[in-house]
Amino acid sequence: MNIGVIAEVVIITVEFEVNDSPIDTKRTTQRFVGKFLRPEFPFESMFAVESKFYNEFTTRAGDAAMKNSAAVVGFPFAIPTAIFTSNVLIVLECVESVKTFTCVEGSPPQHIPKLVKKLAQMHARFWEHECEGLATPAGIGSQLSGEEKRLQFPGCWKYYLVDIPLNSSEKTRLMALCQRLSDKPVLLNTLHDLVDEGPSTLIHGDFHIANMLLPTDPANDVTWLLDWATSGKGNPLRDVAFFFIVSVQPSHRQEQEAQCLEVYHKALTSEATTVRLSLEELQRQYKVCVLNQFVILAVYDSLSKSLAANAKTERLRVELDEHFREVNRRACLSVLDNLGEKDIEALEARCA
C-alpha cells in the first residue's frame, strides 16, 4: 500500500477462473489500482472531479485518439481506464512495464521537451473549453483568492524563506521582492487577476513527474498521465510553471526552460489554429504564473509542513518533508531566474 497525502493507493490482484470444460480449468490474474480517500480528510470533491474526468472527458480524449486509454495518434497522453468511480474510491486498470520518478528526483532531462510538447498538444485540444463539472477553480492552490493572497502573504513570507537553503545574494534579492509585494499588497490582487484572466483551457492542475508513468522501452513514446483530481478550466501556463517548479531540478530548468517555452508555443499554435497567443505573451503569462505559484507556496507553507509532520508513517513524513522543502527551493530559484526589475515594474504599472 502506498499512503499519499489525501489517498491510500493499493494494488488489487484478482484471479479469474475459466471453466471451458469439466476437466479444463484455466486461471488468469489481472491487477487493478485502488485509490481510497483517507477518511480524516474531507476531499470527496477531488474524487468527484477525478471521477467526472474519467467518465466524461476521457470520452473526448478517446474520441480524439480513436481508443480510450490508448496513446495512438490524437490525445497526447495515455489515460488509464476507470473500472469504478465514486467520491471515496476509484479503481483503475493497472499499467505494467513502466518506470516512475519522484518529484525530488525530478524528470530525466531528456524527457522534459517531450513532456512539455505533449502538454501543449493536450491544452490545444481543449482550448477555451468550459470543462463543465471539473474543478472550479482548477489546479493545486487555486482556491486561494487574490484577496487572501493580499491579506496573508505579507505576514508569512519571512517564515517561508527562513528554512530555504539559498545563498546570501539569492536570499537578499528574494527578500527585497517579497518586501516590495508586501509594501504594496494590491500587487498580489493584480497578479492573481493576470493569471485568472489569461488564456484558458483544460489544465491538469497537478502536472508533475510523479503523476506520470514513463515507458521502459526508449523506442516507446507512450506517457501515462494520472491523478486528475484538480483538473478543470484554467490558465495553461499554470501547468507549465507548476511542472518546472515541482518536478524539474533547477540546473535542468535553467538549461531547458527558454527552449521548452518555444517548443510549447510551437506545438500549441500548430495543433490548434484557434490559438491566438504570441510567444511574447506566452512568456509573460509564464512569468506571472511562476510568481503566482511562489506566492501560493508561501501562503500554504505552514499547511504543507503540517501535512508532512502528521503523516501516517515515519517514512512518509520524511519523504513529504523533503518534497515540500525542495519544491520551495525550486520556486525561489525560478522566481529569481524569471522575474526581473522590468517585470515587477510592469506589474506595478497595472496598479497605477
Image (cartoon, grey):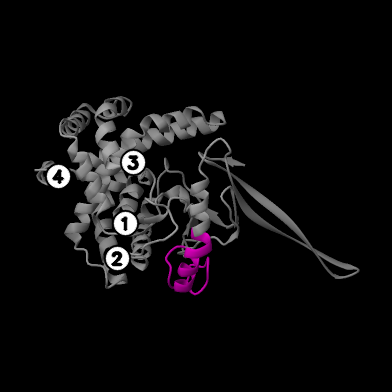
Q: Nearer the viewer, mark 2 or mark 4?
A: 4
On the picture, is 228 further left or further right than 293? right
Which residue, as the protein is rendered here, is positioned at the far right? 22
Circle 3 Cα neighbour tier, 10 Å, few/some/many (<14 / 14–19 / ≥20): some
Calculate the distance from the C-alpha at mark 2 to the C-alpha at mark 4.
Answer: 26 Å
Q: Which mark is residue 347?
A: 4
Closer to the N terminus: mark 2 or mark 3?
A: 3
**Amino acid at pointer 1:** Pro
Closer to the N terminus: mark 3 or mark 1?
A: 3
The quadrant the N terminus occupies is top right
Q: Are marks 4 and 3 in contact (CB under 8 Å)?
A: no
Q: Are marks 1 and 4 in contact (CB under 8 Å)?
A: no
**Amino acid at pointer 3:** Leu
Dividing the picture into quadrants, the one containing residue 269 is bottom left
**Amino acid at pointer 4:** Leu
Q: Position of residue 164 (x, y in %)?
A: 31, 29
Which residue is disc 1 drawn over?
Answer: 236
Question: How many numbered marks does the figure carry?
Answer: 4
Looking at the image, residue 300 lies above or below residue 293 = above
Q: Position of residue 295 (x, y in %)?
A: 28, 38
Which residue, as the protein is rendered here, is positioned at the far bottom? 66
Which residue is disc 3 drawn over?
Answer: 144
Describe the element under mark 3 as helix, strand or loop.
Answer: loop
Calculate the distance from the C-alpha at mark 3 to the C-alpha at mark 1.
Answer: 18 Å
Is residue 60 shown in magenta? yes
Q: Are marks 2 and 1 in contact (CB under 8 Å)?
A: yes
Looking at the image, residue 50 lies above or below residue 56 = above
**Stretch in magenta:** 53-77
Calculate the distance from the C-alpha at mark 2 to the C-alpha at mark 3.
Answer: 28 Å
Q: Position of residue 239 (x, y in %)?
A: 34, 52
